[in-house]
Amino acid sequence: MKSSVTLPITQLDKEPYASILCYPRANPMEIQNRIEELQNHGVQALEFTGKASASNIPVLGKGYVGVVVVAQVNGQRVALKMRRIDADRESLEHEAELLVKANNINVGPKFLAVSKNFLLMQLIDGDLLEDWLETHKDKQLVHKVLVDILEQCWRLDEAGLDHGELSKAPKHLLVDKSQKPFIVDFETASVERKVINVTSVCQFLFMGNSRAAKMLGEVFGERNRLELIGALKNYKRVRTRENFERLLEVLVLNI
């Protein structure tokens, strides 16, 4: 993978960065339209850096809908999601609406601006939860982060906003430098389907074969699987605060 680079947006019409701006393939007319769109947002430069890659260029993230990079706006570094030209949607505006709903209950990176092809958000300076767990083993600290994640999922459930990707959450849970966890990427979120945020994230963190589940087992010890399944079923059947807090107890998160 190529090394990190920062480019003023006026140079984004050159390869290989033109094909990232219009991922997965460059289109001369679309490139110019997108550069103008970025200028309208006040974006001055893009930073191609991160642990993910698109066409061998480092980026913060890449999904079915967009590619995420760092953007410089008025001296500030923000996260910029760029709609793929082969995405199954015409705009990022609906995703922005759902992110705003999440922000209203203190979930997700802060929404900044949106247009057809670009969504600007707070840049979370930190690590994916699984990478964070590799270097953070203190039981009290891990407990604090996990409870925060579960409380955010509880608020999403209460708001009727289903994230949609939390059962396979490695790319969607970040912890910043101040040890604050964030749920990110609301591109498949919905207010139409049944909410399963708490149960989904519990399955990922405590019941699957993920790196996170294995590391949490090392920190907290093994949980009673039958008791956990029972608590999840009770919460799923009757989504009350009492059943949620009982679930926290079963997860050994009431220390």
Image: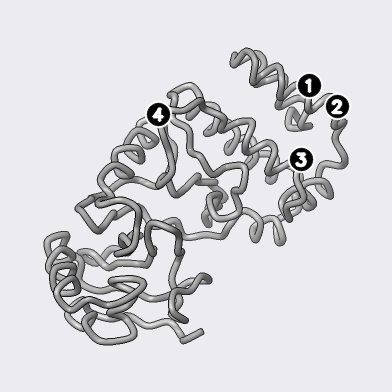
Asked which quadrant contains residue 233, the reply is top right
In the picture of the structure, the residue carrying the numbered disc 2 is 226
Mark 1 vs 3, N-terminal side: 3
- For the residues labelled 3 and 2, the Cα–Cα distance comes to 11 Å
In the picture of the structure, the residue carrying the numbered disc 3 is 207
Mark 3 residue type: Met
Residue drawn at point x = 43 percent, y = 82 percent: 4
> Tag 4, which secondary structure?
loop
> Tag 3, which secondary structure?
helix
Task: Out of 87 and 207, give the one closest to the viewer.
Answer: 87
Asked which quadrant contains residue 29, the reply is bottom left
Mark 2 residue type: Leu
> Tag 1, which secondary structure?
helix
In this rendering, position of residue 54 left or right of residue 212: left
In this rendering, position of residue 36 left or right of residue 133: left
Task: Out of 205 and 74, give the one closest to the viewer.
Answer: 205
In this rendering, position of residue 212 left or right of residue 27: right
Q: How many marks?
A: 4
Give neighbour class at mark 3: few <14, some 14-19, many 20+ (Cα, 10 Å): some
In the picture of the structure, the residue carrying the numbered disc 1 is 230
What is the quadrant of the C terminus in the image?
A: top right
- For the residues labelled 4 and 2, the Cα–Cα distance comes to 31 Å
Image marks 3 and 4: residues in contact by CB distance under 8 Å: no
Answer whether residue 155 is visible to the viewer in this image: no
Mark 1 residue type: Gly
In this rendering, position of residue 55 left or right of residue 38: right
Image marks 1 and 2: residues in contact by CB distance under 8 Å: yes
In the picture of the structure, the residue carrying the numbered disc 4 is 191
| Residue 222 image point, x, y percent | 87, 40
Residue drawn at point x = 46 percent, y = 28 percent: 193
Give neighbour class at mark 2: few <14, some 14-19, many 20+ (Cα, 10 Å): few
Image marks 4 and 2: residues in contact by CB distance under 8 Å: no
